[in-house]
Amino acid sequence: MRELAPTPTENLSIAIVASRFNRFIVDQLVDGARDALRRRGVDADRQLLAWVPGAFELPLLADRLAASGRFDAIIALGAVIRGGTPHFDYVAGSCADGLSRVALDRGVPVAFGVLTTDDIEQALERAGAGAGNKGFDAAVTALEMADTLRALNRELHRELHGEPGREFAAPDAG
Ligand code: INI
């Protein structure tokens, strides 16, 4: 069995889309994501940060960014905290559905760095105060998916054009 072997690729362009609602938490997710991009060596010139009012608005901006064709991956960051009403479920559900739809419709990886928690403490824990930083994790995921798609495209290109180095070769006749 052949296995796709993604390697870290150069010159990735990455967009972060972040929601201002619960900004004191989302700011930490943004910091985490930027830290991951910096460690990976993603050029600051190739990063775009865009803000929207709330998590509900993330999919639309992610869609516009994906449609631009300028980004290898998008990192969506937000914090939806459960209140006493069903509002949480509508906002969180619509956000998650919308973001996954953008990825599938546009063929651009969209990492889901949107916290959905019962309370502020849980959110803070996941924004760097205990259980890691989900913004950092989302950025790592976005980079891996961008690398994987590039590797897949390379393989498909080789398969199509029969360039040397391809490993899709049929069993050797001789
Ligand atoms: N938006 C969030 O990002 N997090 C929340 O916790 C939240 N709550 O709790 O209401 C929230 N609501 C706003 C929503 O995302 C939209 O901005 C708003 O409904 C206008 O479309």
Image (spheres, grey):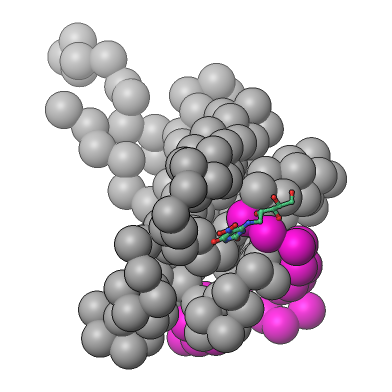
Residue at 56%, 64% in the rendered image: 77
Residue 98 pos. (x, y %): 60, 36
Q: Is residue 168 above or below residue 137?
A: above
Q: Is residue 26 left or right of residue 5?
A: right
Evaluate whether residue 34 shows in this view. Answer: no
Q: Is residue 115 above or below residue 105?
A: below
Residue 70 pos. (x, y %): 78, 52
Region rendered in magenta: 30-55
Q: Is residue 125 one of those drawn in magenta?
A: no
Q: Nearer the viewer, residue 54 or 172?
A: 54
Q: How many marks?
A: 0
Q: Nearer the viewer, residue 9 or 30?
A: 30
Q: Nearer the viewer, residue 52 or 158?
A: 52
Residue at 31%, 73% in the rendered image: 122
Quadrant holding the N terminus: top left
Q: Is residue 118 above or below residue 38?
A: above
Where on the picture, by quarter, is residue 38?
bottom right
Residue 33 pos. (x, y %): 52, 76
Where on the picture, by quarter, is residue 17?
bottom right
Residue at 68%, 59% in the rendered image: 54
Quadrant holding the C terminus: top left
Residue 142 pos. (x, y %): 49, 58
Name the quarter showing ligand 1. Answer: bottom right
Q: Is residue 150 left or right of residue 6?
A: right
